[in-house]
Amino acid sequence: MALIVQKYGGTSVGDIDRIKNVAQRIKKSRDEGHSLVVVVSARSGVTNELIAKAKAITDRPDTREMDMLLAIGEQETIALTAMALHAIGIPAVSYTGAQAGIFTDEVFTKAKIQKILPKPIQKDLKAGKVVIVAGFQGINETGQITTLGRGGSDLTAIALAAALKADVCQIFTDVDGVYTADPRIAKDAKKLTEISYDEMLELASLGSKVMQSRSVEFAKKYGVVFEVRSSFNHNPGTIVKEEVAYMEKVVVRGVAVDKDQAKVAITNVPDKPATAATIFKALADAAINVDMIVQNSSHTGGLADLTFTVQRDDATNAVRVLPAVLKQLGGGEVKAFDNIAKLSVVGVGMRTHAGVAATLFSALGALGVNIQLITTSEIKITVALDRAKADEAVRAAHAAFGLEK
């Protein structure tokens, strides 16, 4: 008998029929003799609806009250799921994040899990009950409800699996695994049977929508092996696990694209010590996350150009913040271009194989795609390019590395 943590996303519990379907899945696992902790998200669309209601009242709702509001979504789902299990004769009990002993830091709307005290859950599991836990939420040390931000339900499931020393963690969603590329873009994309934490982490941070990167980080830190699979069929999914030697035989594991990017270009800024530090501190103070960075220094005139990428929603804010900083530094101009996409190829095999960059750049060059920025790590190469060419570029990169095979 195994202890299994299952997580069902918003589309999986999107209406009453789907909640009943989830209950039948849970029953099947329990009938096989397993103990289950089930983490559920709010029904698809509910969180966005709650945010819209708050924004209809005020453009800047208080973050504490937002967490009070947003926690409602999961609370509805846990109760309905428990009721669906009761209706088919399965003993079950629902828990909010606070009742489940999930303690977080003090940051509202983007809290981080600090510790989990799972004794109440363990007591109900021992009594033979299925425990249904609200994802995405917890409680801080002063008793305030907090939410974990995007991907918070995945994080809840993986954290609970770690705290309970679960045998298996299954992330049920509306896709049946991790693919070599988005199958809506590359029609011949293949589902991966397994992938390393590092590869999954890169794909998650580079545009893949299957998992949020911090959930993968948590799984890697605590050694939680998990499976991404569909709640709409019974096919095996993709196992995410620690890297093993044979994984390096595959040079590139997948291609990811993020079309929600913008490029910010600063020109003719004084080329002197601490210029970059001053600019990026101002961006950090404005909560703007910067990704790819290129600096070019002029051989004459003591001036430099600085280019970087941000999320498209942050571009306007960057252009608003930077003029005052440039004035303080002694000059410079700033412009934003929101027609950028970020394409990445990822694979642990890059550590031991040469020629990956040449293959990628040749494939893009054959399409007439101009590479605007480049950044690399041990297991990834990322380029910024024209958003209009993004899908075509994904297909070209996918074919260049033979990922359809």
Image: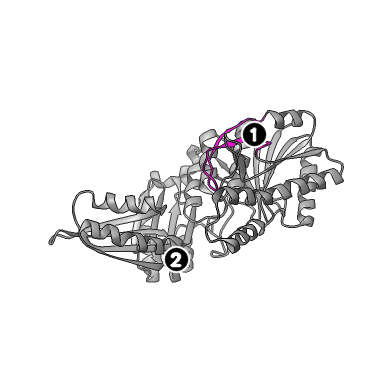
The numbered dot on residue 243 is: none
Q: Which residue is disc 1 drawn over?
A: 101
Q: Nearer the viewer, residue 400 or 342?
A: 342
Q: Quadrant of the N terminus?
A: top right
The scheme the figure's colours follow is: one colour
Q: Is residue 187 left or right of residue 390?
A: right
The overriding secondary structure of the stretch rendered in magenta is loop
Q: Which residue does the image show at 57% across and 47% down from the upper left? A: 64
Residue type of the residue flagged with mark 2: Ala
The residue shown at (35%, 49%) is: 354
**Residue at image point 73% right, 50% down:** 76
* Bounds of the magenta segment: 98-118
Residue to which mark 2 is pinned = 393
User: 59 or 33, which lies in front?
Assistant: 59
Q: For the residue labelled by badge 2, is the local secondary structure a helix, a strand or a loop?
A: helix
Image x and y of residue 286, in percent: 39, 53
Q: Quadrant of the C terminus?
A: bottom right
x, y percent for residue 158:
60, 39
